[in-house]
Every structure is written in structure tokens, then in C-alpha cells.
Amino acid sequence: MRSEPVPEQRVSPLISLPAAGMRDARPGLSGVPADELSAWLGNRGEPTYRARQIGDHVWSAAVQSSDELSTLPNRLRSQLADAFRVSTLADTEITAADNGLTQKALHHLDDGQLIESVLMRYPARGWRRARATVCISSQAGCAVGCPFCATGELGFWRDLATAEIVDQVRFWARRLAEDGRRVTNVVFMGMGEPLLNADAVLEAAAALTDPLRFGLGARHITISTSGVVPGIEKLTALRPQYTLAVSLHAARPALRNLLVPLDHRWPATRVVAAAAAYARATGRRVTYEYVMIDGINDTRQDAAETAALLAGHLAHVNLIPMNPVAHTPWRPSPPERIEAFATVLRRAGLRATVRRNRGIEIGAACGQLAAEQAARPDPAVVARRRDLLVAKSAAALRSPGGGAMA
Ligand code: SAH
Ligand code: SF4
């Protein structure tokens, strides 16, 4: 095989940061701790039951504006509106797909940033009850820069505050309630790397699982990480019952370095060891996400190396056909190759599921809508980036253990 030099430059984001807009100084009501809200009410001479009334509005009714705080006296309602934002989502556009079973929201924040959340409804099947899963963002943009991901293309804008995370769930809860339904699962699989914004993410997860607030079972929350080892360790110390999902995407170092650049800092072996400690501490099976990219990470050898890496661990592998994004030359693996990959994993005693990609037609790969709205990158820049990815992936495939195989 011919060995060509690969350009050294990093695969950098295509779209540069937007100028930061003016921030609204009022904190989001859903992120205010209960004791702070009680103190705020106490300072105004309000009776203690007002805190419960406000809590009912925020958590049970998922109110979106101060006009809906109907049980409060007008004076308190306007004082609250002066001090807090009832929702931190300034404006939202919704797109539907899958006959309305998948809906995607593009939320505008107070400073002009755009974030996305997705609602996926699963009708009841056999003994399984109907589910409504909300996929939420933890950051505006993402600094990790996985080249197959539309959010990676945006670069990093900023961390989301606790209320901005929680309000995405409250937004969908409110819409579902209009149909007599509720949110049953929340997954941190939208824009951003949750464990690089761990404090706000853990506070949001605590609010969502608190029986006095949103009241979701901890097992119904999934936190997905591209492999932030200190964040996984922090989670392990707390021993919650959340599902931990690890974005693996490759077992071979050269390829994982390319697909998940965080691998330079925390290689897959360390990530798997940290995730195994989480599984031991919590008794919860870890989910490994593996995006299947045609001719890149989907060979029999990749399957065998993934099986060897995960063998003996309490693990479940989700194989996800790559959702095509404009700036890459890559395509999803064909279904028969994904099945062959799953067979290798199952023969090694691992659980493996082939996922269907929901909402491809509305760009439900995280960050896709925001990327389209943020800017249209110069076609020449996109073409250069595609060439760079072709060269880099060819180099990774030539590395030890690489090489395309059927
Ligand atoms: N940053 C976290 C969580 C958000 S991404 C993480 O990477 O785990 C959530 C999942 O979507 C990850 O497994 C990610 O790899 C996957 N993903 C990103 N872009 C995708 C694409 N184009 N097609 C399919 N899955 C994608
Ligand atoms: Fe960030 Fe996750 Fe996208 Fe990678 S896949 S760029 S970690 S959001």
C-alpha cells in the first residue's frame, strides 16, 4: 500500500464562534435551589406555602411564562418575573418527522446561542409501555470536535446553566401534557459533552430525579460521554443509578484518536476501566455507543478488537448507523456489515443492539440544525476538510491493526 504523508493540521471546527450577545441577568427559576427560593420569599414576607405553589407550577405544570403562575397574587407574580426567568428558552422552533413520533426543537437562548433537543415517542409494544424520551443538550457547541458530528463542526460556545438544561425537559413535558402524556426518559445525547459541564449536568439530573421536583426515576436518565475520565470518576463517587453511555466508536488507538479526539488525553483502555468501576459501584450495565461509518470503523477486525476491549465487562453495545452530515465524506455502514459486526460481539458474549436512526430527515444528529442556522461555511473550506478527513482516515487505517476488510 502506498504511504502518503498526512497533513499535520488538526481537523478544526468549520464555523467560528458567534459574538456573545447580552445575557439576561435573571437566573432561571428551575435552577434555583429550594432553600434560596424560600429565603427569597421569606425576605418579602410571603407565607411558606408559596414555595410549594411555585414548585407545583414549575415542576408539575411545567409553566413556560409568568402569566401562567395563576395561583399567585399579581404582586408576587410580577416580583418573581423581575427576579427570575420562568423559562430560559427565549424562543423555540419545532420540526417533526417519523409521522410526528420524532420532533426536534431548536431553542434560542437569551444571548442568541442555539441549542437543540429532540423528543422521540415510542408507542407501547407487547409488554413494553409507551415511552417518551427527551434528548437534551448540555453545552452550546462542543470542544471535543469528533469529525463525524455536526456539533463538533460548530466548535465550543459555552456551558449551559442548570436551568437551561432542565428547561429543555420542561418544554417537552408541557407539550406532552397537552396530550395527556409525560416524559419517561431523558438522555444527555444532544449538543455538548455533559462531563465537561459536570456540575450543571449533575445538578440538572438531581432536579429531574428529585421526587419533590421533576420526579423521574434515576434509571430513566442516561448520561453519554465521549470519555472524560475524571467526570466518570466523579459520577462513580456519587453512585447514582443513572445509565452511563460511553461513546467508543473505535477500539484501535489510531482510529479512536481521529474519531474521538479526546482519546489523546484519555485513551479507550482508561475510559473502559473508569466505566467498569462505575458499573461495579452501581451495579448498572454501561452502554457503549458505536457509530458505524462505512469503510472506516466497521471491519471484522474492528469488531474483534472492540469485543476484546469490552470482554468480561458489564456492557451493552449500541451500533448506530452514522447519520450523514454535510462536512464529512463519510456514509453509514450498510446494514449487513452492521449485523456482521454485532454477530462478532455477541459471539464474544457481549450484548449488542443495532439502532435505527430516528429523525434523519429533520437532521436529528446532534447539532445539525444549529450548524445549518449558524452559518453556511465556504464550500472550498468544506471540500478541504473532507480531503483532510479522507487522508487522516486512510492513515489511521494503515496503522497497526488497521486495513479495510469485508
Ligand atoms: N458528547 C457526548 C454526548 C452527545 S453526542 C458524547 O459524545 O457521547 C451523543 C451521541 O451521538 C454520541 O454517541 C455521538 O457519538 C453520537 N453522534 C454524533 N454525531 C453522530 C452522527 N453523525 N451519526 C450518529 N451518531 C452521532
Ligand atoms: Fe462533542 Fe459528543 Fe459531538 Fe463528539 S460526538 S463532538 S463529544 S457532542
Image: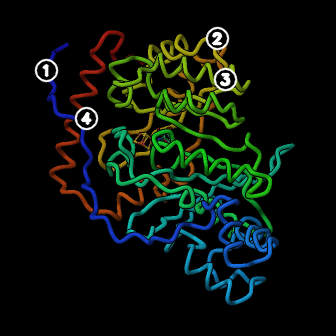
Asked if labels 1 and 3 touch by Cβ distance under 8 angstroms, the answer is no
User: Which residue is depicted at the point 68% across and 78% down?
Assistant: 44
Q: How far, Cα to Cα, is label 3 from label 4?
A: 35 Å
* Residue marked by disc 2: 312
Asked which secondary structure carries label 1, the reply is: loop
Which of 280 and 290 lies nearest the eye of the viewer?
Answer: 280
Q: Earlier in the sequence, mark 1 or mark 4?
A: 1
* Disc 3 versus disc 1: nearer the observer: 3
Q: Earlier in the sequence, mark 3 or mark 4?
A: 3
Callout 3 amino acid: Ala
Asked which secondary structure carries label 2, the reply is: loop
Residue furthest to the bottom? 74
* Residue marked by disc 4: 389
Which of 201 and 395 lies nearest the eye of the viewer?
Answer: 201
Residue 349 placement: quadrant: top right
* Residue marked by disc 3: 279
Callout 4 amino acid: Leu
Q: Earlier in the sequence, mark 2 or mark 4?
A: 2
